[in-house]
Image (tube, rainbow, N blue to C red):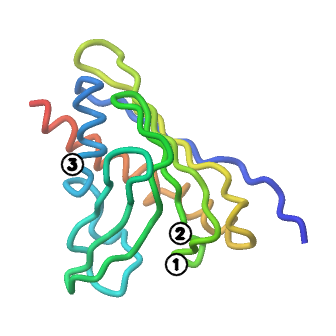
Amino acid sequence: MTIETLPAVRRGITVRASVERAFRTFTASFDSWWPREHHIGQADLAEAVLEPGTGGRWYEKGVDGSECEWGRVLAWEPPHRVVLAWHIGGDWQYHPDQFSEVEVRFTAEGPDATRVELEHRLLERHGESGADLQKSVGAEGGWGGVLELFGKEAEADAA
């Protein structure tokens, strides 16, 4: 069976913060804004981790000390771009053999404003569950809601 190409999910937000601060908040302060209910492990989320640099891990730590992989950093270009491998299928389980990509771009719109554009693409790589994943991450509580949380934290950091 051939899986059709699925349209990418694209969301964006403009934050009142420098491009450097926005990138740092998104990456180094990832745990400070990531929603606690967005986890795939059995245990409640204790920490969401995004390791810096190409090849870095992207994962969660549970309150019980467990770790659950989400993916890897594919590209690390501070303060303008980060690309992440998303190994989580439409069943909300980790799949080491399949991944889509989440690219986040940070573009200065002045000294204290940054446009942040997120694109979750290649969702068809998740096979039949790709369409379900696309609907979930494109829904109100998906990437748009996550970026709103990020934006609030980036602006609070800038104050």
Residue sticking out furthest to the left: 159
**Dot 2 and dot 3 residues touching (CB under 8 Å):** no
Q: Which residue is mark 1?
A: 93
SS state under label 1: loop
Tell me the CA gap for discs 2 and 3.
22 Å
Instruction: Look at 36% across and 68% down and name the residue there.
Output: 38
Instruction: Look at 90% across and 72% down and name the residue there.
Output: 1
Residue 51: x %, y % from top left: 31, 53
Name the image quarter holding residue 12.
top left
Instruction: Look at 57% across and 51% down and name the residue there.
Output: 101
Q: Which residue is mark 3?
A: 29
**Dot 2 and dot 1 residues touching (CB under 8 Å):** yes
Residue 111: x %, y % from top left: 24, 13
Q: How many marks?
A: 3
Amino acid beneath label 3: Ser
Residue sticking out furthest to the right: 1
Q: Earlier in the sequence, mark 2 or mark 1?
A: 2
Residue 64: x %, y % from top left: 21, 86
Q: Left or right of 144: which side holds 42?
A: left
Q: Is residue 141 above or below residue 129?
A: above
**Dot 3 and dot 1 residues touching (CB under 8 Å):** no
Amino acid beneath label 2: Ile
Q: Earlier in the sequence, mark 2 or mark 3?
A: 3
Residue sticking out furthest to the top: 110
Instruction: Look at 89% across and 65% down and name the residue there.
Output: 2
Name the image quarter holding residue 44.
bottom left
SS state under label 3: loop
Tell which of 90 and 58 is nearer to you: 58
Q: Which residue is mark 2?
A: 88
